Amino acid sequence: MFKSFSSFVCALAIGAVVLPAAATGRYGFRHALICDAIYERIPDPERRRLHARVAESAVGSDVGTDAFLAHQFERAGRPADAL
């Protein structure tokens, strides 16, 4: 797929990987397999840091449902924060 994380970032920058969802202003991958392949290439410590950042940003927002926060904090390696 991508030879390096920086090549993924370049693909992301030109829109080859994600499509903006006009109605929500959110982004998603063009295909679930692309998402899976990229996710697996992110080193575990970075992946946990990103999940923690998402969870912390979502606390108190309309996106921050209990299930969403629990998932993000669990993936961040911080399950106690999901309580």
Image (cartoon, rainbow, N blue to C red):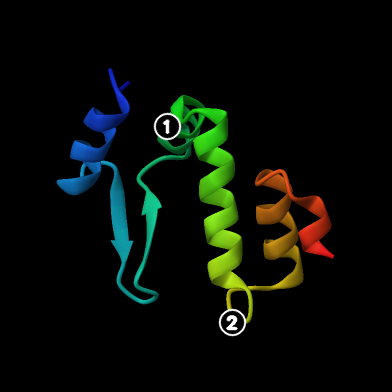
The residue under the point 77% across, 61% down is: 81
Q: Is residue 23 above or below residue 4?
A: below
Residue 6 located left or right of residue 52:
left
The residue where tag 2 is placed is 62
Of residues 28 and 64, the one nearer the viewer is 64
Q: Name which residue type carries label 1.
A: Ile
Residue 65 located left or right of residue 23:
right
Residue 34 in which image quadrant: top left
The residue where tag 1 is placed is 38
- Mark 2 lies on a secondary structure that is loop
The residue under the point 35% across, 45% down is: 30
Image spot of residue 72 (x, y percent): 65, 54
Q: Residues within 10 Å of mark 1 (few under 14, many from 20)?
A: some
- Mark 1 lies on a secondary structure that is helix
Q: Is residue 16 above or below residue 7?
A: below
Q: Residues within 10 Å of mark 2 (few under 14, many from 20)?
A: few
Q: Name which residue type carries label 2.
A: Asp
